[in-house]
């Protein structure tokens, strides 16, 4: 099993419905749902990646409410989960932070609802991973990670497939299913 | 594989954080995330169960925006997903509706983040199911389905377990993981 798995929820660079590169706005429920799933499966840290200072400040404000404010008093389970959240200006910053923390090379993994020729299944991924190195699993908001971002990842995981061609899971659902598949 | 699987998102009877029976308010993102996961995995119908008329009206309004209004024009994938949503005043009404549709007995399945002595694993459940009968999988909002509701279900599925004792997944994450485990 992977020793130290990190998550990144990327708000830039992602694409909009027309495939144009954008920076997306924070969806606050993403913080809660993905932190709770991360806590469930033992993720070491969950990076909210946004270059926008107002969005970084909003993220810090939400984390503070649930970890140091009244939210955490009322709901201690939520406190534990939201303590996993870290804020980064870029994916590169998040990666540098993890390398520093682990004193180790880092494996970057991209996810997408689209098929890529060189993507690997979760089973293949589990077979080939170096358990000693930390890994970061990146998820795109909006219409997904940009092509350039995907090209820079060490590995791309296959999309989650269901019964037909429909591939419009929320990022919250996609994170939950990928984590369950990786750890179970 | 199950032929006709339905989902129910139950807003009453559920319990609050103190274990007291309540009726909960609609969380609109639940409709989107659970409809999208349902569409992905081939769920036949997704019942939003609430006894409150204002909440039923709100649900209908959201469905209408995304299936007949501008939402569906902008986002056809979302339209397909939200067309799966049906509104019911009670779980019993949803069950009656399904029995009528299928001219068949219905198997009711409860889910919980808590352990019950007689709960079954997904694997056991898949082994014992009668593929010809429709099944309905019930999820509780707030702090989960009431004890009475659980007692009335034909089967209770084991909670989703991760690495430790943390069992505070969002209902959106739980639905996604249960569906993935049932269909994959």
Image (cartoon, coloured by chain):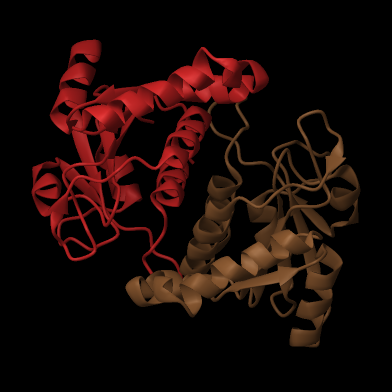
Chain colours: A red, B brown
Q: Position of residue B164 (x, y in %)?
A: 57, 24
Q: Residue at x 78, y 71 (%)?
A: B94
Q: Is residue B82 above or below residue A78?
A: below
Left or right of A6? Residue A103 is: left
Q: Position of residue A159 (x, y in %)?
A: 31, 58
Q: Position of residue A107 (x, y in %)?
A: 19, 32
Considering the image in quadrants, where does the N terminus of chain B appear? bottom right
Left or right of A143? Residue B21 is: right
Q: Quadrant of residue B102?
A: bottom right
Does residue B16 appear in the picture of this structure? Answer: yes
How many numbered discs sit on the rendered protein?
A: 0
Q: Is residue A139 above or below residue B60?
A: above
Foreground pick, A28 / A116: A28
Q: Quadrant of residue B59?
A: bottom right
Does residue A131 appear in the picture of this structure? Answer: no
Left or right of B111? Residue A148 is: left
Q: Position of residue A41 (x, y in %)?
A: 48, 32
Q: Residue at x 61, y 76 (%)?
A: B44
Q: Residue at x 28, y 56 (%)?
A: A158
Q: Residue at x 25, y 53 (%)?
A: A144
Left or right of B53? Residue A83 is: left
């Amino acid at each position: 099993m992977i020793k130290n798995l990190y998550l990144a929820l990327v708000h830039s660079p992602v694409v909009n419905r027309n495939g144009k590169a954008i920076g997306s706005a924070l969806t606050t429920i993403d913080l809660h749902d993905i932190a709770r799933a991360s806590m469930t499966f033992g993720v070491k840290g969950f990076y909210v990646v946004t270059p926008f200072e107002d969005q970084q400040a909003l993220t810090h404000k939400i984390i503070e409410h649930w970890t140091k404010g009244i939210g955490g008093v009322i709901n201690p389970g939520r406190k534990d989960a939201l303590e996993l959240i870290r804020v980064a200006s870029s994916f590169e910053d998040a990666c540098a932070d993890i390398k520093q923390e682990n004193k180790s090379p880092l494996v970057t993994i991209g996810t997408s609802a689209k098929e890529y020729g060189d993507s690997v299944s979760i089973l293949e991924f589990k077979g080939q991973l170096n358990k000693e190195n930390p890994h970061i699993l990146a998820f795109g908001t909006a219409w997904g990670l940009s092509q350039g971002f995907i090209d820079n990842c060490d590995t791309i995981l296959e999309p989650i497939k269901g019964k037909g061609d429909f591939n419009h899971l929320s990022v919250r659902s996609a994170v939950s299913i990928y984590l369950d598949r990786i750890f179970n």
